[in-house]
Image (spheres, rainbow, N blue to C red):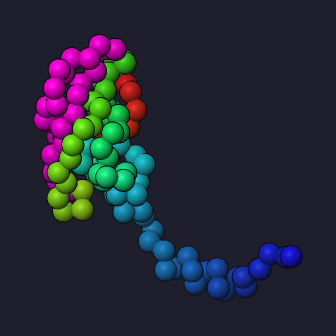
Amino acid sequence: MTPCKLPPNATRAILTLLPKELPPSLQSKPATLCQVLSRYPRDGVGQIVHQSRWPLKGIHGSYWQVTRTKLKLEGKHGKAWGRLVWKGKMVSQSEELIPGSLKYSWTTGSS
């Protein structure tokens, strides 16, 4: 079976229909916490996230484990709760509101 080839003008037509830039919810670059969490199923519950500035300040092995979210406006605003692990040690005994969710740039993974 041979693959179907599209004529060059069809390929161009399809490309004109696609957006020039991905919407914020589909981008993988750092963003506000709400935007980062909105990219994942269940609004990011279970994700590990950290502020992008932490590695620049020499803070390693630190992250928030997201336990609950309440996102609004397609992930542009909202709140998130979780447990903080700071430099490898669990700091939060119980779930707490994650501060700076709209103020700072966030990304997934550990710092």
Residue at 85%, 76% (x, y): give it.
2
Camera-side residue of 95 and 52 = 95
Membership of 92 in magenta stretch: yes
Task: Pinpoint residue 54: horizontal percent, then vertical percent.
Answer: 30, 24
Task: Pinpoint residue 104: horizontal percent, then vertical percent.
Answer: 22, 38
Q: Which quarter of the picture shows residue 111?
A: top left
Residue at 48%, 74% (x, y): give it.
18
Residue 78: in sight, yes or no? yes
Membership of 98 in magenta stretch: yes
**Which corner quadrant holds the N terminus?**
bottom right
On screen, residue 2 above or below 66: below
On screen, residue 105 above or below 34: above
Extreme residue toward the front, this view: 94
Camera-side residue of 58 and 36 = 36
Q: Which quarter of the picture shows residue 85?
A: top left
Q: Which residues are magenta?
A: 76-105
- 18 left or right of 43? right
- 30 left or right of 6? left
Task: Pinpoint residue 61: horizontal percent, then vertical percent.
Answer: 37, 18
- 44 left or right of 6? left
On screen, residue 74 above or below 37: below
Residue at 32%, 35% (x, y): give it.
49
Residue 56: in sight, yes or no? no
